[in-house]
Each structure stands twice: as structure tokens, then as C-alpha cells.
Image: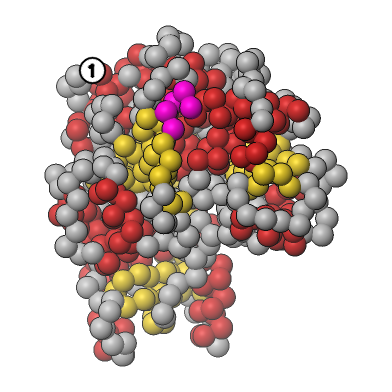
Amino acid sequence: MSSDGLDGTYRLHEREWSSYAELCSSVEWQVPDQFNIATAIADRWGESDRLALLAVDEDGAEERYSFEELDRAAARLATVLADDGVGHGDRIAVSGRQHPSVAIGHLAAWKRGAVTVPLSPILGADAVAYRLRDTNATAAIVGESLLETLGEIGSLPDAFDSVYALSGETDLDAADSLDARIDDAAPMQTPATTAATDPASVFYTSGSTGDPKGVVLPHQVVIGLLPSYLTLKCDLELTEADRFWTTSEWSWIALYTTVFTSWFYGASVVAYDRGAFDAESALDVTEEYGVTSLSAPPAALRRLRDAVPDAAVDSVRVVFSGGSLLRRSTVEWARRAFGPVSVHVSYGLTEAACISGNCEALGKPYRSRTIGVPQPGHEIRLVDPMADDCAPVPEGEVGEIAIDASSDPVCMSRYWDRPDATARAFRDGWLLTNDLGRWTDDGYIEYIGRADNVIISSGYRMGPAEIEESLVEHDAVDAAGVVGIPDRDRDEIPVAAVVLADGVVADEELEVALQQHVKGALALYKYPHAIAFVDELPMTSTGKLARATLREDLIDEDR
């Protein structure tokens, strides 16, 4: 491993700590002026025969890449990109499932100083076209599903003239076989130099309201993720035998929080190239390939629980989850299925990932209805969302979660070509998250809900997330979504859509029982005034509740 000055703060797992507070107080950000994610990984491990990537597909076919092989493949693709005119700052779309060439594509683009635009392979033609045009992308590295989608787009950006196909056939004149081009190329010897603050990727938000916004993440974001990677995903233990796997697509921020952070430390990553999520297959992959750190959103963990309630996989020692609140019943299942295991929930967003969570190794375990404690190096404040400044709200009050972005490398730099949206996101050097929270007495953050989804009924303010969490704690409920709908007398009332557990029958008696359950758990006024029993909840492409759609559905039903 090379010495690049990124030790100390970033080697937290190699020291003994008396407390979590001591660990946090030791973190001082070290960000060099020049930093490139691909170069950092290559300089540390590029000549190593350590296993970097263990890739398996649905048919069981395996590919293994050492760090040396991974870097050489990226260097060859970088030569191809250079030959085709891709240069510093150009945008390259990268799409595919958990395929080796997806990760190699990002590394190769960065070796050219280009900016990657991750695209989900399940996006439709309009969504893909919007992202390509918005970034004026010049090229794309895509899998079979998106090749078909590109063929459906009538007008591509003027600068867009190169498509590199991972697999499949296409009628696109610009498409080339990626493997064939790489096989004929010599490795690039001199990668581009980038500043730590130069853009590395543009991730697009799910766009629940208005057009999606491109979140510009600079190269230094990986540096900002390192301390929380060690606490949240490693629980301060990291060995050469560790293997990391996320069930999430590599088109989302998990690509950074699992893949590139693991490679910074020379750790092995598992890739499972699959179609639709299958719980039993996911558990098989976890067990067969010795996954020690499993990352999965709460919905995926619930599907694992429901599909294999008596699972017993002994390789996993850390279960990491984020994206929404984690239910206590799911945590209890994980402890039985993988135990002994540390179960960590994390909070963050694409604009600033993994800023709070847990660390069982230092006495910060999972707490129901919370998103953990601030992670090392990240200063969090709860502020009044309506105020002009970022003064903290009084102790015990609900406030908008804000992160000090003045020196924190994990924060986005801006929204792509959206100066007004960028200005709204930052206030006095703080990045506003649009999420509401409340400090507990022992320093955890209780998650209340989205600031723009707060329900105000008869003067009472309530977050839908806390009502949802209360509903799903009832044995009859499998999933729940809560929104506010207009009411003549109270301005708004909370209304719920509920997916019942298998075998439970919906009736008026159950609706009353659920309302009483929430009243007893939260407050007399914090209960759904009406409950619709549904087969499934509307979800965004990132697996989150589509509140706008749910609200429209429930308003229509109320009429």
C-alpha cells in the first residue's frame, strides 16, 4: 500500500478507543489538493494480487479480479476513451447491474478526468434522455436493457457519439463491444490529474416533484466516507478475509459507500449480476461467498426475513441498512439469522451520505425510531427550516437536519446547472437535508420525517414517518405509508395506506384497532383518521415511498 498522506484519521480501525466520543474527537479531515478516486485505489493496490472483485451472475458463472487486473482493465478502457476523444470534464453515462464493467467504466472515466453519470438500467427512455441532455453527455457505457432504451430515444445530445456495450446487440450505429475494444487497447500510462474538488459523478435524484436534480459529487467524497465506512460497515474491524456486498444497484450512492470505499482499503467486494431481487438467492450469495458485511435497505431485509424466517448464515458480522427507518422486528430477525452480528442503521442522502448511524463496537447500538448518532467528522445541527440562519433549535424541539458543509468532504459541491436549487440547499455554510429530527437525551437523532411532508392538523405538527413506524410495529401490518390530505375543519388530516401481513383480513374492527394502537404509542392526535387497506404501496425507482402518488390516490379514494 502506498503512502499518500491519507492515514491517521482514515485508519481508525487500527487503534483502541476508550469511547465513541474519543474516536470522534480524533478525526481531522485531511484532504490533499489533488485527489482522484481511481488513482488513489491504483496507487495503493494497483500492483497487488489481492482479490478486489468476486462477480457472479444468476447462472452461477464467476469472474475474479485482483486489484492489478482491475486497474489494468480500467487503464485499457481509459485508452479507448482517449482514442474516441473523451477528455477532462466530459460526462460519460454508466449503466448496468452489478457487472464488473460498470465499476471499471467509472475507474476508466476518472483516469481520463471525465465525470460519470450513473444511470439505473430500469430507467425509461424519457428519463434517460433527460439525464443525457441535462449533462450533455458525450458517451455511455451500458448494459443490454439500456441499449434498447437508447434505441428508443429519438434525439440524443449533439456531443453524444460513443456507446460501449457490456453485452447484447443493438441497432445503434455508435455502439461498440466494450470487451472487443478493451482487448485491443494498451493500458494508459499517465492518468489525468484532478483536484479533490473536481466533479467525479453526477447522481440524479428520484425527482418526486419537478425534474430530477443532478447531485454533483467531487472526488473528495470518498475521503469523506472513510471514517463512517469503518464504523458503520466494519464496526471498527477490517481484515483481508472480509468481503463486502450491497444488494443495491450500482447506479445509486451504494457504489461509493460500499464499492470504492472498500477498494480504498484493499477489501474484496462481491457483485451479483441479477434481474429482479430474489430473497433466497440473495441469502445464498451471502453464504456461498462468505459475505462479512451485508448492506441492504430495510425493504430488502424484510423480504429476506419473510422469505427465510429461519435463516442461519454465520459469515456476516455487520448488517448495514439505510434509506428509511429499520423496524425492531427486522433487527431481531437479523440477529437470529446472522448472529452474533452488529446491526447498523445509517442516515444520509446522495448529497451527503452516511452522516449518522451506529457503532456497536463503541457502545452505540441500534435504537428504534432513530437514525443513530453523528458519525466521526460530521457535525450535525437541528435548525428551524423557516429561519434565515442556521442557529440550533432549543433542546428537545424538532428541527431540520443540517450538516456543516464548510469543510466536510462528504458533501456535494452543487446541483448540476441548478444555481437556484444549490443556493436553497446551502445556508450559512450548512447543507440542509429537508429531513426533520429531534435529539434524544443520549445524543441519538429521532427521525421525524421530511420537512416538506410535515402534516399540520389543527395546529399540531406531525411527521408521517413516526406514524408509519408505529403502524408497522403492529403484528397485523407489513408496510404503511402516511400522508396529509386536505380537511375542511383541520386544514389537513393524516391518512394511511396499509399493506397487511399474510393471512390478516381487513375490516372496520381492525382499522379501529390500528388507530388505537397509534394513539397509544404516539399521542392522541397522532393517528391516521382513515386507513386504506392496499395490496402494495407506490414506490420510487430508488425504493422509497412515492408520497405524491400515494397522496393523490388517497385523495381520490376520499372523494
Q: Does the magenta stretch include residue 468?
A: no
Q: Residue at x 66, y 27 (%)?
A: 185
Residue 161 image-quadrant placement = top right
Q: Identify the image quadrant of the C terminus.
A: bottom right
**Image-based side of 113 in relation to 410, left or right:** right
**Image-based side of 398 in relation to 79, left or right:** left
The image shows residue 195 at horizontal and vertical percentages of: 62, 19
Amino acid on which disc 1 is placed: Arg
- Answer whether residue 297 is visible to the viewer in this image: yes
In-front residue for pair 7/274 = 274
The image shows residue 10 at horizontal and vertical percentages of: 37, 20
Q: Disc 1 marks which residue? A: 15
Q: Which residue is drawn at 51% across and 56% down?
A: 542
Q: In this view, does 252 lie above or below 46?
A: below
Residue 162 image-quadrant placement = top right
Q: Residue at x 46, y 11 (%)?
A: 4
The image shows residue 534 at horizontal and vertical percentages of: 41, 80
Q: The magenta stretch spans which residues? A: 65-69
Q: Identify the image quadrant of the N terminus.
A: top left
In-front residue for pair 549/83 = 83
Q: Is residue 396 above or below residue 199?
A: below
The image shows residue 183 at horizontal and vertical percentages of: 62, 33
